[in-house]
Amino acid sequence: MARAIVNVPATARRGEIIEIKAMVGHAMETGFRRTQLGKLIPRDIISRFVCTYNDAEILRAELHPAIAANPLLTFTTVATASGTLTFTWTGDNGYSMTASATVTVV
Amino acid sequence: MSARCSERPRHVLAAACVFLHFAQAATAAEIPLAERRSGYDFMGRETRAMQDDDSTNPGMLWVLDGEALWSRKAGATGQACADCHGDARASMKGVAARHPAWDAASGRPVNLEQRINTCRSDRQKAPSLAYESRDLLALTAYVARQSRGMSIEIAIDERTRPFLEAGRDAFKRRQGQLNLACTQCHDKFWGNKLAGNNIPQAHPTGYPIYRLEWQALGSLQRRLRNCMVGIRAEPYSYAAPELVDLELYLMWRARGMKFEAPAVRP
């Protein structure tokens, strides 16, 4: 199922600063909450996000329990060449999600 | 002890003033059509921007799930929604904006969730989806998304009028330990603050909504039950006829307003 939405401009001029938005569906359970019976709900969060642009890492982020569910990360990069941006989220319980988008630089 | 006794009359007086204030409000008139405002208008700039952009609106995660479910075969008949209804972008256009709508089989108006579940149980021969389950929210969001930008059209005729009136009565009826009616906040005191929050006019223009407080998508019934707990009333259970009547009244009250599902609300 589609659980990630990424937004990258389809085309950009060489050297232009482009905005990238990456949102992923995840509960981001903090590990601090308890059930009504007092039992601790185990932590289940995304802990790491990596974005690569033509295999070169352009952003890496560490996520922590205070980050909201369905985290949205917005950042910028310089459009250097046409190619693919790959987004990878990894986290607790073997969670892994990837998405990609292409940009054409003219 | 004596201090406490002397304080008491003042408390009673204050409480009486509050009740007098609300007693006047209990007869609050309905908001004139031209003065109606969506909850969107009460939100901050950032939350509006979040809703307006499909790549930042978290409700779209459910819409995409719903799109996948739309063409997934289910039930004993092995049919998907798409097998009968085709492309939802055409066939489901405007559907959410006219629900709750009359259902001949059950002899009363049904909301969108109930319509989806009826289709599942009667046509697909698949088990009904539970309220607030991921799949039902996803399908509802996907169907509701097709009505975005359209105006809400609730057809009231002789069959649906009694249910509309029941919903209106519920909206105006004092309930719960706080003895409050919906109308007291949403017809009379909209635009003011309740604690730190804006009091909106309670127009269900964007359900299912992604509520930031919930960190998830939720149905109108979840929101209504939420409000009932707030006034310390016993909430109706999901799919209760009373809640559907209230939904019908609220959608009729928002008739002509722009549908904006999936909306983001604080």
Image (tube, rainbow, N blue to C red):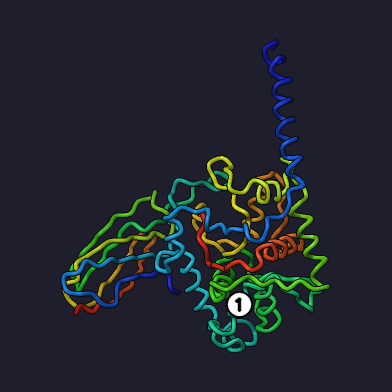
Q: How crowded is mark 1: few (under 14 residues within 10 Å), some or many (20 or more)?
A: many
The percent coordinates of residue B71 (x first, y second) are: 53, 83
Residue B72 visible at all? no
- Going 16% across and 70% down the picture, which residue do you hit? A15
> Does dot 1 land on a helix, a strand or a loop?
loop
Instruction: Return the residue at label 1.
Output: B94
Q: In which quarter of the image is residue A55?
A: bottom left
Looking at the image, residue B252 sits to the left or right of residue B43; the answer is right
Residue at 80%, 60% in the rendered image = B166
Query: Where does the C terminus of chain A fall, quadrant-wise?
Result: bottom left
Q: Is residue B171 visible?
A: yes
Q: Which of B205 and B56 is in front in this view?
A: B205
- The image shows residue B2 at horizontal and vertical percentages of 70, 10
Q: Residue B52: image x %, image y %? A: 45, 65
Q: Height in image: B191 above or below B102?
A: above
Left or right for B246, reference B71: right
Q: At 76% across and 60% down in the image, what residue appears?
A: B167
| Subunit ID for the residue under disc 1 | B
Q: Is residue B177 left or right of residue B86?
A: right
